[in-house]
Image (tube, grey):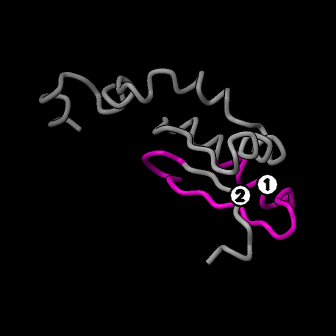
Amino acid sequence: MAVFYLKHGKHPKEAEAQKPRLKDDPAQAALAPADGPALLVRIRETGGTLTVPDCGPKTRARWRAAYQRALQHGHVPNGCKLRVTGRDKGDMVLKIVDEQSAP
């Protein structure tokens, strides 16, 4: 950490917070769905695939929480699966897929 501070003149967490993707993270996190049914509605509104552009940790956590609630509380329709990619970095893509076509 001392080397980072000497090189950049700030704490690593301060440097991370200044990245453009984190600039509006609390505001973006508030736009994420609060529960599983709301998540499924949002995915359906986008034609079955929803992409959340590279986002900050709070926003990503809110989307992951809604995904988990949808799975745990049985909100995914029968015959379908809910898939997610980009849980930790990059764009987060959520899809509703037909079980018959899912590998």
Q: Is residue 48 above or below residue 31?
A: below
> Which segment is the magenta one?
64-92
Residue carrying label 1: 70
Q: In which quadrant of the rendered image does the C terminus lie?
A: bottom right
| Relative to 15, 32 lies left or right | right
> In which quarter of the view is residue 45 placed?
top right
Q: CA distance from mark 2 to mark 1?
A: 11 Å
Q: Residue at x 56, y 50 (%)?
A: 93
Q: Residue at x 60, y 21 (%)?
A: 27
Amino acid type of the residue tagged 1 in the rendering:
Ala
How many other residues sit within 10 Å of disc 2, few (<14), some (14-19) or many (≥20)? many
Q: Which mark is residue 55?
A: none
Say which of 21 and 48 sits in front: 48
| Relative to 102, 21 lies left or right | left
Element at badge 1? helix
Q: In which quadrant of the rendered image does the N terminus lie?
A: top left
Is residue 79 one of those drawn in magenta?
yes
Q: Residue at x 35, y 27 (%)?
A: 19
Q: Position of residue 22 (x, y in %)?
A: 44, 28
Q: Position of residue 73 (x, y in %)?
A: 86, 58
Amino acid type of the residue tagged 2 in the rendering:
Ile
Q: Position of residue 24 (x, y in %)?
A: 51, 21
Residue carrying label 2: 96
